[in-house]
Amino acid sequence: MTGGCLCGAVRYESSGEPSFALLCHCRDCQRQSGSAYNAALRVPAAGFRITGGTPKLYVKTADSGNTVSRAFCPECGSPLYLLVSTRPDLVGIRVGTLDDPSGFRPEADIFVQSAQPWDYMNPALPKYPAYPPGRSYTPNS
Ligand SMILES: [Zn+2]
Ligand SMILES: [Zn+2]
């Protein structure tokens, strides 16, 4: 898979098998996306690399206590992916930045405890107040 930002300055590629396809409704994702949620695809960090430009990182401690680094293009501001301190083996790609996002099949809505009342969610998808069991970034939870 390949992808990049709106202006094209930052480009990336990912060759690993995705492990989780999710829609995150947390407030941090709402603020960073400027929308109701973020569509994200967790891929192995080992198969992920930047092929053009240098993204800027915004680092914030999440409600979970994890340190989350959100990568975005310093030129156009597009959010590209995120990294979580406790899971350096994973990268969470922002699905809308893929060159072809059409194959994305979300498995779950997460952090629906902070979803907005006007955010219509697919009733067929499982919903979790925060992380689904076993999907947290915190080891052993
Ligand atoms: Zn850009
Ligand atoms: Zn989120």
Image (cartoon, grey):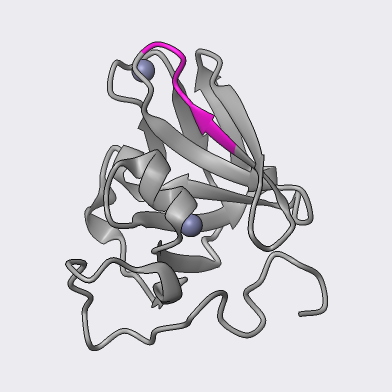
**Looking at the figure, which quarter contains the C terminus?**
bottom right
Magenta residues span: 70-75
10 on left or right of 65: left
Closer to us: 16 or 9: 9
Image coordinates for residue 32, horizontal then vertical, percent: 41, 40
Image quadrant in which you'd find residue 97: top left
Say above or below: 48 vs 20: above
Residue situated furthest right in the rendering: 140
Q: Is residue 98 left or right of residue 130?
A: left
87 left or right, relative to 62: right
Image vertical order of residue 42 relative to residue 85, above or below: below
Q: Looking at the rendering, in which quadrant would you find the N terminus?
A: top left
* Residue 121 picture location, percent across and down: 23, 75
| Residue 58 on image: x %, y % | 59, 30
Q: In the image, is residue 103 above or below residue 33?
A: below
| Left or right position of 125 against 50 | left
Quarter of the figure with residue 120: bottom left
Q: Residue at x 43, y 66 (%)?
A: 21
Q: Residue at x 44, y 76 (%)?
A: 113
Residue 112 in magenta stretch? no
Residue sitting at x 56%, y 43%: 82
Question: Residue 136, percent across and down?
Answer: 66, 71
Is residue 6 something that shows in the picture? yes
